[in-house]
């Protein structure tokens, strides 16, 4: 499935960043996310653990930043991911469960995912976080529409905190401007990240589906929006998605 | 100077943790910290950069934690250090200066300090942060008594945020209980950390002294309190300081 969405958009490098995603209109069937009813506990557990991994990636980016202003900006981004993590943990406690127990089953796959998206150097590390956090924050936010209304709106507020993406985009843009040969390597790297990210997204559906609701196979179009977002994000950096 | 204070307390391992520091009473001459008048800008710059280093150390401890509960506890501790850093940065902005410019001169020595206190494994990393952050937070808090009153009280509130020390102490205590052979190694490591920490403390006096105030040579007894705190901290872990 990911291959179909994905290979659609391979093609010539665009002349300049553009806002309209190169996605076939037929791929854009809208999905009503409120038809998906995630189980709150595993949903929150997976979302919280993923934020912890984003935090760890950002903290590594802080520790290895080439300049103090980059370090400083990324430290703020790491703070945002950590706040998201702790706020989601607080929601689990509110539901009367022990966050560690709920997160534990998601740890092995998420740890592998972080290692796979850490990249070969600082720039790939940054793009890895930008791409995967961008896709998954958006995805979990939209899945949250199927949660009980008040919980869902708190979760969307938590995941919607801005900050990290702005810092990452501006660091990456500056790096690409300073060294245009980075663009091809990062474009390739951005493509390589999509498959693993979709696997995590798909596992979220499996983990948090309530019995009797739509199965993962029936919600493939959900992923189309993920890909559209991804393409926009890469376009904004002048990179071919 | 550090050698004198330091070698005083080498000796037989105590039978049990004890609260009274084994420091010669003559070493305990009280210093009025309000007699020291730190220059606010370099004071804040060094304090802020040191918190960023503590954050990086704690983030490394999160990433390499052996269990999820440890990871989770340390992530909260990392959040505390990051908040201290960002709050001190905010004080610099309030004074109309660019934090990166102010922090930059302190980066090389502080980076070396962090590397020197990172230790050989996860337990030494934890003790390294516990010992150095404990001493330096206390020290900068007390130096802050010489800042303009309102700034000084805000800085003491920032540095006084609890949380990290509790987590580190409980992790270290659990580790030592689980493997008593750790105690001797960590006691040695705790001793090794003191010299470097005192050098950073001494550089703070040099960096932030206003002209005409007491010089570093005249305030040696200041360090006595640092050592007393250190001894209490090690005693609380059942370690010979």
Image (tube, coloured by chain):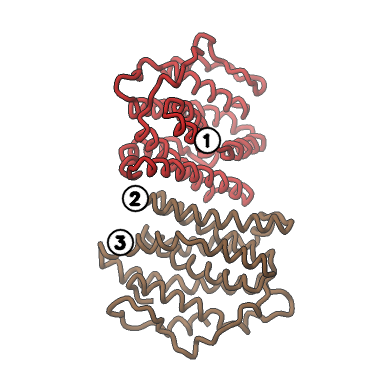
Chain colours: A red, B brown
Between A127 and A147, the one nearer to me in the picture: A147
Quadrant in which the C terminus of chain B is drawn: bottom left
Mark closer to the chain start, 3 or 2: 2
Compared to A58, does A47 lie above or below? above
Identify the residue shown where x is 32% and y is 25%: A210
Measured Cα–Cα span from mark 1 to mark 2: 26 Å
Compared to A198, does B77 lie above or below? below
Element class at badge 2: helix
Q: Residues within 10 Å of mark 3 (few under 14, many from 20)?
A: some
Where is residue A22? Give x, y as percent. 57, 15
Residue B216 placement, left or right of A210 = right
Classify residue A185 by image quadrant. Answer: top right
Label 1 sits on residue:
A157
Mark 2 chain: B
Any part of residue A196 in sight = no
Any part of residue A228 in sight = yes
Mark 1 chain: A
Measured Cα–Cα span from mark 3 to mark 2: 13 Å
Residue B15 placement, left or right of B225 = left
Label 2 sits on residue:
B69
Label 3 sits on residue:
B175
Q: Residue furthest top?
A: A26
Q: Residues within 10 Å of mark 2 (few under 14, many from 20)?
A: some
Same subunit, labels 1 and 2: the answer reads: no
Badge nearest the viewer, 3 or 1 = 1
Q: Residues within 10 Å of mark 1 (few under 14, many from 20)?
A: few
């Amino acid at each position: 499935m990911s291959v179909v969405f994905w290979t659609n958009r391979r093609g010539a490098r665009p002349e300049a960043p553009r806002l309209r995603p190169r996605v076939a209109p037929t791929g854009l069937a809208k999905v009503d996310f409120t038809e998906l009813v995630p189980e709150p506990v595993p949903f929150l557990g997976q979302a919280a653990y993923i934020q912890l991994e984003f935090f760890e990636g950002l903290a590594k980016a802080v520790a290895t930043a080439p300049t103090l202003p980059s370090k400083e900006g990324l430290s703020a981004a790491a703070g945002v991911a950590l706040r998201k993590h702790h706020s989601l943990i607080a929601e689990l406690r509110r539901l009367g469960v022990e966050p560690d127990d709920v997160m534990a089953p998601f740890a092995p796959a998420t740890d592998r995912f972080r290692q796979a998206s850490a990249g070969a150097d600082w720039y790939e590390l940054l793009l890895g976080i930008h791409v995967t956090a961008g896709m998954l924050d958006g995805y979990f936010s939209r899945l949250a529409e199927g949660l009980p209304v008040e919980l869902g709106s708190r979760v969307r507020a938590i995941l919607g905190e801005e900050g990290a993406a702005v810092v990452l985009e501006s660091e990456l843009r500056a790096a690409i401007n300073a060294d245009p040969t980075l663009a091809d390597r990062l474009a390739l790297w951005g493509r390589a990240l999509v498959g693993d990210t979709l696997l995590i997204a798909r596992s979220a559906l499996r983990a948090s589906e309530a019995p009797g609701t739509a199965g993962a196979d029936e919600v493939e179009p959900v992923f189309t929006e993920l890909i559209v977002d991804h393409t926009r994000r890469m376009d904004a950096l002048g990179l071919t998605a």
